[in-house]
Amino acid sequence: MESNDLWVIFGASIFLLIGGAILVPGIRNVSRAVASRHWPTTPAVVVQSESSVETDRGGRGRDPSTMYSATIRFRYKVDGREYTTDVLHFGQTGGSGDSSEAELRRLRYVLGSEATVSYNPATPSIAAAEPGFHSEVLLLPAAGLAFLAPAVMFIVLYFGISRDNSLVGAGLAMFAGIFATLGLALLTIGLVNLSSAYEGQRWPQTGGAITYGKIDSSNNSTQMADGERVTSTASGAHLVFGYEVNGKKYYSNIRRFGQIAGRGGDWAWKIARRYPLGKEVTVHYSPRNPNLGVLEPGIDREAFWLPGAGAAFLLFGLAVFIWGIPALTSGP
C-alpha cells in the first residue's frame, strides 16, 4: 500500500468516525420515537418553560446569526419515584432561526400547567411529552449519513481509478444514491405538505387570534471573483396564533403548508401587516390532531418548491444510474 493510499484512508476515516458518532444516536432516537407510541403514559407538570436567544456575531468572512430556543421541562412520577425530562419528542432540534418555534413551545407548555408524558417502561427516566414519529428525528441520522456516504464513496472511487476500474461503477452508484436518497426525502416531505394543504380546505374551522408576530432577518454574503463581497438579506414573517377546539386551547405557527422561511424585498412586511398582533383569524385545524392548524389552507406555489427540488435531485440520481454509469464504465 502506497503512502498516498494511507493518507486517503486516514482522511476518509475521520469523516467515517464523525458520521458514525452522529448516526448511532440518530438511529437510537428513531427507535425510541417509533416505540414511544406504545409506551405507558403518566400525568406530568411543567416545571420549566423558558425561551432564550443566542446571537453569533460572526467572525471574519461569516455573517452574524441568531438562534431561538425554548427549554421545557416536565416532572412526573412512575411507581412512586420522581423523574424529569426536557424531551418534547425524540430528535427535536435545540434551536432554530425561526423565533416562532420557540414561542410555540413556550405557549403550548406554560409553567405549572398539567401535561402527559409517555415513558419507557424499562427505563422510566426516558420519556417524551409528544410520543411518536416526528420528521425532525431524521435530521441526526441524515447528518451522519452525510459524513459516511461521501467518505465511503471517495475511498471506492480513489481505489477504482488507481487500482481496479470495476470499482468506479460502485463509487458512481454511491454518488447517484446520495442524490436519489436526498431527493426522495425532500419529495416525500413536499408531497406530505401538498396533501395537507389540499385536505386543509375541508378541515373544520374555528376562531382564533394572532398571539405572536416577528420578522426575522438573515444576511448571506457571497465572495465575488474580484474580491468584492455581496450581501443579501432574506426576511421571514413568523407568526403564532391561538384557537380553541372543544374548549381546549391550541397554538400553531403554520400560515400555509410549504411556506417559505424567508425571501427578499418587502414580502415579509406584507405578511406582518396582514396578520398584526391581536387580529382575529379563522383557523382550519386537523380533526385528528387539533395542534395542526393553518391560516391559509389550499395549494399555493410556495408548496411546490420542496417537492420540485426533491424531484430534481431524484431525477439526477436516476439519470446517473441509468445513463451515466453505463457510459463511464463501458469498455472502449
Image (cartoon, rainbow, N blue to C red):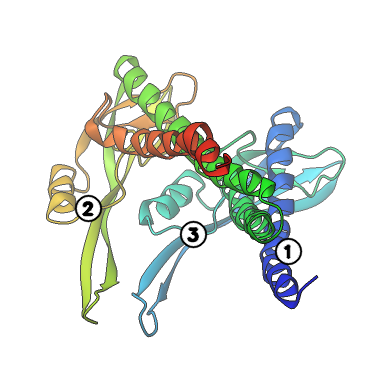
Q: Nearer the viewer, mark 1 or mark 2?
A: 1
User: What's the amino acid at mark 1?
Assistant: Leu
Position of the C terminus by quadrant? top right
Q: Nearer the viewer, residue 161 or 298?
A: 161
Q: Is residue 294 above or below residue 275?
A: above
Q: Judging from the image, what secondary structure is the residue with disc 3 in?
A: loop
Q: Residue at x 41, y 53 (%)?
A: 103
Q: Give above or below for 175 relative to 39.
A: below
Q: Please, what is the three-letter code of the amino acid marked with disc 3? A: Gly
> How far separated are the C-alphas under marks 1 and 3?
25 Å
Residue 137 visible in the shown view: no
Q: Residue at x 37, y 77 (%)?
A: 62
Give the residue number, with chain letter if any, for mark 3: 95
In the picture as drawn, the residue positioned furthest to the front comes out as 332
When asked about the image quadrant of residue 132, the answer is top right
Which residue is painted at 62% across and 49% down in the image?
A: 168
C-beta proximity under 8 Å, tags 2 and 3: no
Image vertical order of residue 181 relative to residue 293, above or below = below
Q: Quadrant of the N terminus?
A: bottom right
Q: Nearer the viewer, residue 132 or 218?
A: 218
Give residue 234's quadrant in the image. bottom left
In this rendering, position of residue 82 left or right of residue 55? right
16 vs 64, left or right, is right
Where residue 283 appears, as percent x and y from the top left, is 30, 28
Residue picked out by circle 2: 263
> Of the numbered discs in the image, which one, if any, rests on residue 315?
none
Disc 2/disc 3 C-alpha distance (Å): 21 Å
Q: Earlier in the sequence, mark 1 or mark 3?
A: 1
Say which of 152 and 120 sits in front. Answer: 152
